[in-house]
Structure formats: structure tokens, C-alpha cells
Amino acid sequence: MTKPQIWVAAFLAAFILLFILQKATKKEEAPTRDLSSQMNNQMSEENTTELTAAQLISNFGCTNCHGGELQGTQMAPALINLSEHWGKETLLNYLRNPNDFMDEARFKEYREKYPNQIMPPYGNKNIKDLGKIVDYLLTK
């Protein structure tokens, strides 16, 4: 074997040894921790259903980009008069997965006007909460 081959073999052996050591010393998380975090998530979801649409919009962080009164900012467009462009089902689907709508002409304009800004998907949120938000936005 040449010297470079010896070095490669030594590094490979050290890597394998460290990998095996890591697997052998890895501690498994206690199931109670997992259950408690699931319960906290369920409790926080249950608590959100008692909030108003305006409170949900604030909690979800919409006002961070769209402004306190949803009038729009340099980061995101205004969320008023949405009923001109959206129906309830379509807006709900948009909130759950905005990337599905990015090929539409209006969103191409938004990408130019608001570069490097991405609307986050809310597919992981309670559908009832999203429904409250949609109803609220369609009446603004």
C-alpha cells in the first residue's frame, strides 16, 4: 500500500469507529417526554379554537409581514378586499399550501414586488382556525 492509501484507510477506520461509538452511546428519549410534548401541542391547538380571527392572525404572525391592520408593508401585500380575488375554499387552500398558487400571474407580480419573501404554509394549523381567518379576511 502507498502512503496515501494508508491515510485514507486510517481515516475510514476512524470514521467507522466513531460512527459505531456514537450509535452505542446514543440515549433514547424517554416516552413520557414525547407524550408530554404531544399533550402540550394538543392543548395549544385546543386553546386556539377559542380565539377570535384577529387574535389568530396575530398569533400566526400574519401581522409581522402584512402589517398591524393588514394594510400591507414593504414585506407583503395588503389583505383587504380579498373577496375580489378569492373564494372561501380557494383562500383556505392557499393558506394551507401557498406554493400551489405561485404560477398565477398575480403571484408573479408579487414575487417581483416583494423579492426574497415567502408566504409560509399553514397546513399544520387547525382547519377550524384557518376557516375563522378566511371568513374574517373575506369580509375586510
Image (spheres, rainbow, N blue to C red):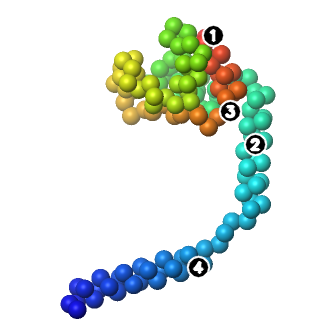
**Which residue position is annotated with label 1?**
139
Disc 3 to disc 2: CB gap under 8 Å: no
**Which residue position is annotated with label 3?**
126
Q: Nearer the viewer, residue 3 or 61?
A: 3
Residue 62 visible in rendering? yes
Which of pointers 4 and 2 lies earlier in the amino acid sequence? Answer: 4
* Image disc number at residue 42: 2
Give coordinates of residue 42: x percent, y percent: 75, 42
Place residue 127 in its image quadrant. Answer: top right
Given the current orientation, which residue lies at the most extreme bottom position?
1
Which of pointers 4 and 3 lies earlier in the amino acid sequence? Answer: 4
Disc 2, SS: helix
Disc 3 to disc 1: CB gap under 8 Å: no
Taking 113 as reference, is 46 left or right?
A: right
* Image disc number at residue 24: 4
Disc 2 to disc 1: CB gap under 8 Å: no
Disc 4, SS: helix
Q: Amino acid at mark 4?
A: Ala
Label 2 Cα crowd, 10 Å radius (few <14 / some 14-19 / many 20+): few
Q: Amino acid at mark 2?
A: Gln
Label 3 Cα crowd, 10 Å radius (few <14 / some 14-19 / many 20+): few
